[in-house]
Image: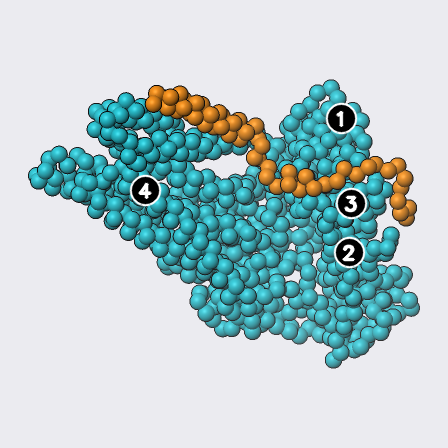
Chain colours: A cyan, B orange
Amino acid sequence: MAELKNSQTRTLCFHCGEDCIHEPILAYDHSFCCAGCKMVFEILNRKGLCDYYALNDQPGINCKQKINDEKFNFLDEEKIAASLIDFKDETKTRICFYLPQMHCSSCLWLLESLHKLNEHIVSCKVNFSKKEADIIFLHQKISLREVAVLLASVGYEPHISLNDANKQKAPVDKTRIYKVGVAGFCFANIMLFSFPEYLGIDEKETQLLLLFRCLNLLLSLPVFIYSASEFYISAWKSLQHKFLNIDAPIVLAVWVTFGRSLYEVVTGSGSGYLDSMTGIVFFMLIGRVLQRRTYDRLNFERDYTSYFPVSVTKVEKDGVHQPIALPQIQLDDTLLIHNEELIPADGILTKGKALIDYSFVTGESIPVLKETGEIVYAGGKQTGTNIEILVIKEPAQSYLTKLWNKKDRKELHENESSFVHVLSRYFTWFVISISLSAGIYWSITDASKAWDAVTAVMIVACPCALLLSNSFTNGNILRIFSKHKLYLRNAEVIEKMAAGNVLVFDKTGTLTQTAYRDVSYKGQLLNSEILAKIATLASQSLHPLSKAIVAYLPKSNLKVLAYKEHTGQGIEGIVGADLITMGSKKFICGDTREDNAISFSEVYVAAEGKPLGKFSFRNHYRDKIPALLQKLQKHYRVIVLSGDNDAERNYLRTLLGDDTTLLFNQGPSDKLQMIEQLQSSGNRVIMLGDGLNDAGALKQADVGIAVTDDSNNFTPGSDAIMEASVLHQLYAFIQIAKANKKVVLAAFIVSVIYNIIGVSIAVTGNMSPMIAAILMPASSISIVLITFGLSSLIARSILKNDQ
Amino acid sequence: MSVIILLLAASILVAAGFLMAFIYSVKSGQYDDEQSPPLRMLFDNTVQNKTKENEG
């Protein structure tokens, strides 16, 4: 049995840096992987923009996918264009495009030089963090559609989603920043003005003393009223629900401190603790800002409409093609679906040959052939020539959405079960009880100290460590995760990840790469002549297995006569005087024996009726996944669900051993049921999947992680998004999530020590403002150092050990 | 010693000025994009040549 060797050398494309899988195209002293990349180079070269390549190596984006020029036709529609543009006057229009492909300084440079590519573009300003480009153009000379096509032609195809078109962009929320600014200003100044009193101003200078104290009081007002307002609102809301959340102790501390300080200043009995009060508010707000920054990294609230294209082409009664927006699709509309375009609604195929890729619906990675009259479902992608469908169900009711929306009821179960919240609920009562008992004690022993002790305890008992340690650690862990391309929706997901004990994997697209399929050949040695004939024959067919063979073999372009395709069985044709046939085992060998039902993934080849050998197809698993699965098995129960048939069962078995559960032919509702079953027997499930077909299951799982190759497209309400390239580090990520709790605990213990020291001083009634002022910032700062430092160190060592 | 009142007033005014500047700069959107200005700074202003290089 001879095996076909892969004899391609590796050259990298000068433009995009990817492997030139077929023969590289040589031009201008450089190699390119495809005509698209070469075309972009020519455009840039012609306009003198080759600095693009000088700034970075291979900065381009792969242009293998030919852009469908008609794709942006909908931008010619007045209504759609009007909802997308920012500003328009007689000559200029301004629009903001989202260009997710931007990734380096070359991209920035090229986009801001857009006016050099086309003189009717006035300017282009890039916001790199948001990956947006603000373009101003002369709309009388160049249309919006042409601008989009121009961007696409240099590799930066604008991603336009219905979401953005419908909503007004929310103004960036800066109020918290203002609050931090105000709090910081007041805090620093109050501390400065407190120095005289702490550092020994003469007691007789009562005027000055009073002056400083009043200044402090005045300065504390903005903080008390404005900066701390969000804590009041949050605590009030939780109070309405009859429990105390983590903001309640802060509010208590702030109010008690302010009240006592006010009393002291007014009666002249002391200087108050205003520096401590403003300090708490300042540090708490900073913690919140840091957390929010990490969350905003990814826009999570995209609903499913972002996945479907914004508009589709409708075929009118007179045959005219009309672009319409997604919500306008109605029953009995005829839609024209192009190659690589998504089907937006369930419909009946009326014209053309449909080869639908349902990998996001059923997980089946082999496209399905549909004939006219058959039903095609929304979410599938057409691969092949244009087809027309008659809509039988409006988009909102397609069965995918049904599956998805059904799962919304899980939100009701989302209650705060993290241990910090549990602790905070009791913390307030605990503090109050201590201060009351101190008060009672002192009112018996020495009444003058009673009030001091009560309020001092409430001031000093710092819940900030509880919160700071939690929010800083969480924030840091989230930041570390996102640096490693795992984006969590919020900090609660960290705890849920740490608590999981069952891991469920979707196979297609998660464990396997969606496009590439390992092809191997077994049979008689084939010389290049026969190979060329086989390749030529295969290229006539639209069947996906044929396409995979074409991709695998060297290109050839011979002539085929008498080509015939027997659907479901095979193809035949005369190439260069030889009758070549390819197809299923039954077709070629006449053998009806079933080989473990794997007839699917093999293509037999024969010449002149004599069988030569067979091509076997294996799904290509992502790198290092086998190692990951084996590692995970030792600690968790691992289940693999797949929408494909069980052709891979044996291979997966050898990979995973006998302990994993492998289930095939799982539809979306089967996956959902499996998750529900596991949860009802008390398991906590972490699910990894890739797309719409497991959206319901992802949402139902305790942690649903969407594994994607392009984090722009798939956010179907999952709890986390993971880029496929880092999937093999899953075990390390879970370890880090577990370490999170330990770091929080460590910081918490440190803060408890501070509290004990502080409270013991406070109950003696001897606490001076200076001591309080020192203790509070000191504890906060040390907590910050511990949380950041420890969590970063631990994360780094875990990731290193995982290599 | 009453000069200290003057000093206090002056220092508070200056500090308040800085606070206003902070609020203004955040409001004007200076910090919305922190990644492009550093990159943009390094680009050369190339002189536009009318001659075309490398005619393929």
Task: Give residue A139's mark.
Answer: 1
Badge 1, how many Cα within 10 Å: few under 14, some, many 20+?
Answer: some
Q: Is residue A795 above or below residue B52?
A: below
Pointer 4 chain = A
Q: Quadrant of the N terminus of chain A?
A: bottom right
Mark earlier in primary sequence (3, 1) = 3
> Which residue position holds label 3?
A51
Residue type, label 1:
His
> Which residue position holds label 2?
A13
Q: Point out residue A243 in the picture as x, y percentages from the top left corner.
A: 28, 39
Whole-number angstrom distance, CA of label 4 to CA of label 2: 61 Å
* Point 61% across, 67% down: residue: A647
Of helix, strand and loop, which one carries label 4? helix
Residue type, label 4:
Ile
Mark earlier in primary sequence (4, 2) = 2
Badge 4, how many Cα within 10 Å: few under 14, some, many 20+?
Answer: few
A266 to the left or right of B42: left
Badge 3, how many Cα within 10 Å: few under 14, some, many 20+?
Answer: some
Q: Closest to the observer: A6 or A38?
A: A38
Residue A227 shows up from this direction: no
Of helix, strand and loop, which one carries label 3? helix
Q: Point out residue A553 in the picture as x, y percentages from the top left corner.
A: 79, 65
Q: Are marks 1 and 2 on the same chain?
A: yes
Residue type, label 3:
Asp
> Which residue position holds label 4?
A774
B31 to the left or right of A226: right
Pointer 3 chain = A
